[in-house]
Image (cartoon, rainbow, N blue to C red):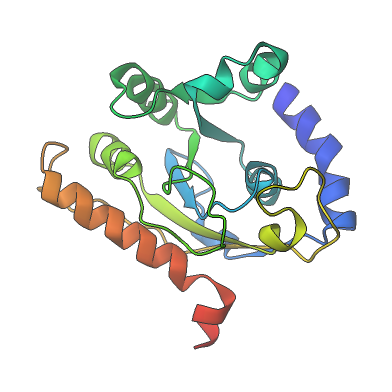
Amino acid sequence: MFYWFVKGVFYPFVTLYLGLSRDGLRHLPRTGPVIVVSNHVSYMDAILLGSASPRPIHFIVLQWMYDMIAIRWFYWGMGTIPVRAGTDARGIRRALRTLSSGRVVGVFPEGTRSADGQVREAQPGAALLAALSGAPVVPVFIDGARDSMPVGTRFPRPARIHVCFGAPLRFPAGRGARDREALLEFSGRMEIAIRALEPAASAA
């Protein structure tokens, strides 16, 4: 209930003030486990992606953010999944339990915000989740967030935000989570899929 309350609070803001639009929702399965991976340029990205998705998204957040007392209640209420930087077996198990219950897990595979807006190399964490869970991976590109609230700003400016969902990817059958090469290859596929949804790339 808390998730839908927060979404209801933010939805008028992102639709009226930021003019949120979206497409490609047909690519997001209506039920079952899904991993959503997106570019990351602004603190607003989780709000924008959550507003654009008809299904609740349980975002992975770094443990140090989750441990901030002032906002931990918010992260807890939103069903976020805290993980420690590097290999965190406990965090991975939390994410896998979320997926096994048929829910959506959100990951920003670059690991941090991109200051210049360019999609950076995807880290293997999302690929590992895909390998262990078998869940489809839906790439997403958020356009306009950097124009509204780039790194270093505190309040969003009016901008046109567009969220585009792409066709799902599947971790290759027969390649396991212990296959480092397969994880890196799949991470590269995710990065390419996200880049391909950028308006400039789609128009090229």
Horizontally, is 100 left or right of 178 in the view? right
Residue at the image position 25 percent from the left and 55 percent from the top? 186
* Residue 1 in sight: no
Q: Residue furthest bottom?
A: 204
* Residue depicted at x 75% and y 31%: 4
Compared with 34, 59 (above or below) is above
Residue 56, compared with residue 17, is above or below; it is: above
Residue 24: image location, x then y, percent: 57, 65
Q: Going 65% across and 25% down the picture, which residue do you hit?
A: 78
Q: Nearer the viewer, residue 13 or 116?
A: 116
Q: Quadrant of the N terminus?
A: top right
Which residue lies most toward the top here? 69
Residue at x-position 55% and y-position 51%: 40
* Whole-percent x, y for residue 168 in the image: 40, 58
| Viewer-proximal residue among 56 and 62 | 62
Q: Is residue 34 left or right of residue 183?
A: right
Asked if one can make out residue 197 in the rendered structure from this viewpoint, the answer is yes
Q: Position of residue 50 (x, y in %)?
A: 65, 43
Give the number of marks: 0
Image quadrant assignment for residue 100: top left
